[in-house]
Image (tube, grey):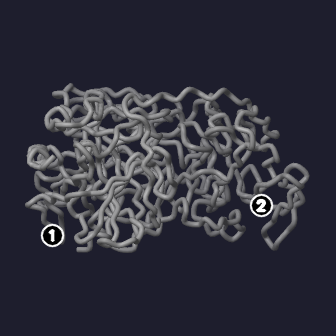
Amino acid sequence: MNPKLVCFCLVLAVLLIPAELKHKKHKKYRHGHEHHGPGHLKQGRKKLTFDEIIKDIFFSVIDDDNEDDDDRSDWLYDLQEPEGLCNPNPCFNNGECELKGKRKFKCDCPRPFKGKRCEKAPKVCRKGMCGRGECVLTSTRPYYECKCKAPFLPPTCRTYSLCEPNPCKNGGTCSREGNDFDCQCAEGFRGQFCQVGPDDCFVDDGESYRGNVSETDDGYECLFWNSHFILARGVDPFDSFEDQDGLGPHNFCRNPDGERMPWCFYRRGPHLLWDYCDVTECADPTAVVPTALPPPTPGPTAPKPQPTEPQPTSAAEPTTTKAPTTSRPSQTPPSQAPPPSPTPIATLVPSTSASPQQFSTCGMPQPKKAITRIFGGLKVAPGAIPWQVSLQVRPKNSNQPFRHICGGVLIESCWVLTSAHCIEKNKDMQVLMGSLSLDTEEPTEQTVNVQEVIVHENYRETPSAVYNDIALLRLSGTNGVCANESQSVKTACLPDAQLADGMECTISGWGSTEISNFGSNHLLSADVLLINQEKCSEPAVYGEVLDNSMFCAGHLQGGVDSCQGDSGGPLTCNQNNTHVVYGLVSWGDQCGKKNKPGVYTRVTNFVDWIRSKIQASPP
């Protein structure tokens, strides 16, 4: 079994959209997947051509308007049999859960939602409903609108016309090229439809940007913020979409979460990704944000003052630079019976010479800004998962650049947890922390060499499973200080008790390895549910191969299952408002396959081993 050919599943829920993922081969380790993210096509690309739109399955025309809504089965929820059928609440969209006997429940759904768990709305964004266009959700009947891909015409996006009416804005000239067209923009204007004016720029980090750029820096067209690709179940899509962060029923780039510049979501096949936008920084950073030209789609236009960012509570942001490479907010789960509070490992294994202010607490992120108004579970806000690290390797004693191979989780200034199958012998190793992007140097990042690798003595792999898949990395440092605590670099706590089945936890990772063909260089996250061990050991799932060193976790919501993540990365759960690293991404049967959820190393089984190795290590 090759430990370089596997990815773990970040299961991303996409509302009411059927999608099928094609897998080239069976994969066990959760190591790699198709990669296509920022940096992959830096030469840029044109807008979708006529033929590309016709061939895209998501812009297909389906004439049967009576086709039933895609009814995602409740296989995963039934598989889990969580303790307390109404805790956590299984009902989406503010539905109220009522117990019906010992093993049944009923969701009282607010209008217009329906379904066993209030997950369905009447005829909203079924495949083919918008023909050659993107389906976006609205707050009024019929609760959706079609945003056509030019040259197809509204309202149904099934007919097309070239250059009549002229799609080019601000005096642009439309020229025909077969079934395609191109906008020749007046001087100073740019964009696919000449919608971006000469004064369209951003100041500082672009939080106040309200301009008209709607393309990524690689030329991909941005999705509408109220697109059904972005809105997840659990968020009421029938509320108003406009808010103070500039998000609304438009596809203009914005920065609602404290990124370094405006960005947007875009779609690549069935995968939902995000990237920074092709937007210009204003020449004078002290100037007032220019008033944007009237947008082609109604949206917020008024600038707003930049907010004051929260500051780190301990050490200043590090200045360590990132080694060259080739190559967002946690949600608090529903309330549960309070188990014992986790104990920071720092208090159990004190460093003899580290500053008392360094990593004195664990599991307490300080994200710059939470973004849950419209979407959730995909994009990581800066500082939201500060214990996530990138494990990188290169040939021993070489000058080659380091390459990302796995994820990991910081548990002390000088200690990182990862999966044992990630370890490559005879390689130089380092960890990158405090970074959200693997292809962009960030001022918050720190790079520290790995001094020692400790693989669990009973680690073994078989054709059907991986056992005791855990390893410790001791980092290089001085006087017991390796990583420096900051808003972007913090430790996760070790767990001290088993957690309830059905509890919602978070997985995260980049998923870009040297063999990847699709994914994201930006850190992504998703929420998963802890699955009952007995049910996961049934013949239809993983059978008798599971033991107590591992557990299963999956996503309650179904939808698009994207293989975007890393082995060795953390599965963290919010226990009494403290984030504990409950699992490490280990293995699985492909990604998103029915009855084949992700398998994770059960960290609670190894807490004593972790502490003993740290205590026995020389200072």
> At x 21% / y 26%, what residue is drawn?
337
- How crowded pointer 1 is (Cα within 10 Å; few <14, some 14-19, many 20+) is rated as few
Q: CA distance from mark 1 to mark 2?
A: 54 Å
The quadrant in which the N terminus is found is bottom left
> At x 52% / y 55%, what residue is drawn?
440
Amino acid type assigned to the residue bearing label 1 in the image: Thr
Amino acid type assigned to the residue bearing label 2 in the image: Pro
Mark 1 or mark 2: whose residue is earlier in sequence: 2
How far across and how far down the image is residue 128, in percent?
A: 60, 57
- Considering the numbered disc 2 on the image, is that residue within a helix, a strand or a loop? loop
Q: Which mark is residue 151?
A: 2
How far across and how far down the image is residue 442, in percent?
A: 50, 49
Q: Decide if residue 374 is in sight here.
A: yes
* Relative depth, front residue between 456 and 592: 456
Which residue is tagged 1?
A: 462
Q: Image quarter for residue 89?
A: top left
Q: How many marks?
A: 2
> At x 20% / y 39%, what residue is drawn?
494
How far across and how far down the image is residue 29, in percent?
A: 27, 65
Q: Image quarter for residue 165?
A: bottom right
How far across and how far down the image is residue 59, in percent?
A: 62, 60
- Considering the numbered disc 1 on the image, is that residue within a helix, a strand or a loop? loop
Does the CB distance between marks 1 and 2 fall below 8 Å?
A: no
